[in-house]
Image (tube, rainbow, N blue to C red):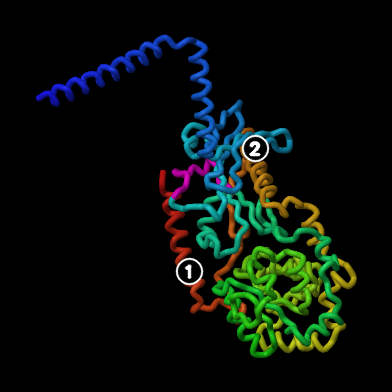
Amino acid sequence: MIEKQFLYKYYYLKMCRVFKIWTKISKRIFKVTLNEVAWISAISLTILLIWTWINGETKVIKYGDNPVIMWWTSGFPGTSETIHCPNNIKCDFIKDKNYNEIFNVNAYLFYASNIKFDDLPLPRNPNKILWGLYHEESPRNVEELLHEKILSLFNYSATFSRYSDIPFPLQYLESLQDITSTKYFKPTRVKTKLLNELSPILYLQSDCETATERDTYVKELMKFIEIDSYGACLNNKEMPMKFQEDYLNNLNDDDFLNYISRYKFVLAIENGVCEDYVTEKFWRAIKIGTVPIYFGSTTIRDWLPNNKSAILLEDFPTPKRMSDHLKKLLNNDNLYEEYLTHKTKEEITNKRLIDEFKTRQYQRDALEVASKFECFICEKLHDNNVGMQVKRVVSKKHYNCPKPISALTLQVNPSNDWVYSWEMAKKRADDIYDKVTNLK
């Protein structure tokens, strides 16, 4: 009994102490001075700003009557500011979708690699709101965009096609000097001596399942001529130890470029076929002075430094005929060097290539391309405000990639898994188009 009374008393005293402490706190709160209120407010605001910054949220304050543009896709390039463009025009950019309902968005931009077709700013209002597409990747990247119905949902584009509104067909060419520089170039006599330890042809790929059936072609070519294959695909030769650890991230290092420039030829077969889609596979060969055996862009002749800067599969349409031609060049240095005048004579005779590179210097930098595209859309919105807007949609010419073509047959192979994938993507594209255009 005594113990119970003691416990009751103990808990009673505890409760009294807690009550007194809470009473003191309450009184103190009501006696807060103005200075203390200011300090508390400043600290709270600082904490809020830090929290907002950590969570990557940027509140955009819209000034005046600038048109509003939103990058609907996340990540690249992430613009969220007022941009100032030529001719003294401005637009406000926002990237946070939480503000989509607050501001009257006049245009949406989409970075193709991050696009989600189940998350689009619907309903689509093509008469009032512009859609712009930025796409620099190969046809296998977003297969729905291979089909014109999906492309037609967009009003303007920035792609590698020369017909795009902001074209960048030379995105992988770093400089014209790279074409003529002999920094990595090995004279023919040196390459000929190296044939004692090297095959005449280099093949370096680690992506073995491609829409162009690249490995299938190379495997067949190997039956007629020796090829050194270093990558994961058809591997038959080990790289030196210093390149083995992470060569894919060091393809442009001086040591590596000097190593592969010892070969007379390199197989440069793209993983997809599109007009004006010419990647580093081609330009790296041009840079180091080894002759590319090329398949990919259907318009590659328009971008060759000289008429004979590459050997095209379409000119020697079977592996046997290609090997016969290569052996002919191996036995005749003069014929071989006809493909290397950009190095031996330091000449570029292709005026289209020179003009394209000098006129559109922005295309070497993806962020500059994005900035150029943003200002292009901004200008169109200002034109719209003064009644100059012309209604138009993106056509197939802006991203022209046909049904997958095999490097081996130079035709569509119905058994190719990528052909089936292309057909399935077309069905998805039709469904997406119907959903977007029918939703009011």
* Quadrant in which the C terminus is drawn: top left
Give the residue number, with chain letter if any, for mark 2.
383
Q: Main secondary structure of the magenta part?
A: loop
Q: Amino acid at mark 2?
A: Asp
- Along the horizontal axis of the image, is 352 left or right of 391? right
- Relative image position of residue 292 (x, y in whole percent): 74, 74
Residue located at (90% from left, 71% from top):
345
Q: Quadrant of residue 432?
A: bottom left
Name the foreground residue: 230 vs 324. 230
Q: Position of residue 385 (x, y in %)?
A: 61, 33
The correct choice, above or below, for 6 with respect to 239 in the image is: above
Residue reaching furthest right?
345
Q: Residues within 10 Å of mark 2 (few under 14, many from 20)?
A: few
Front in this rendered view, residue 260 or 354: 260
Residue 36: horizontal and vertical position, in percent? 49, 14
Question: In the drawing, what numbered circle is on residue 421?
Answer: 1
Any mark on residue 185, and which?
none
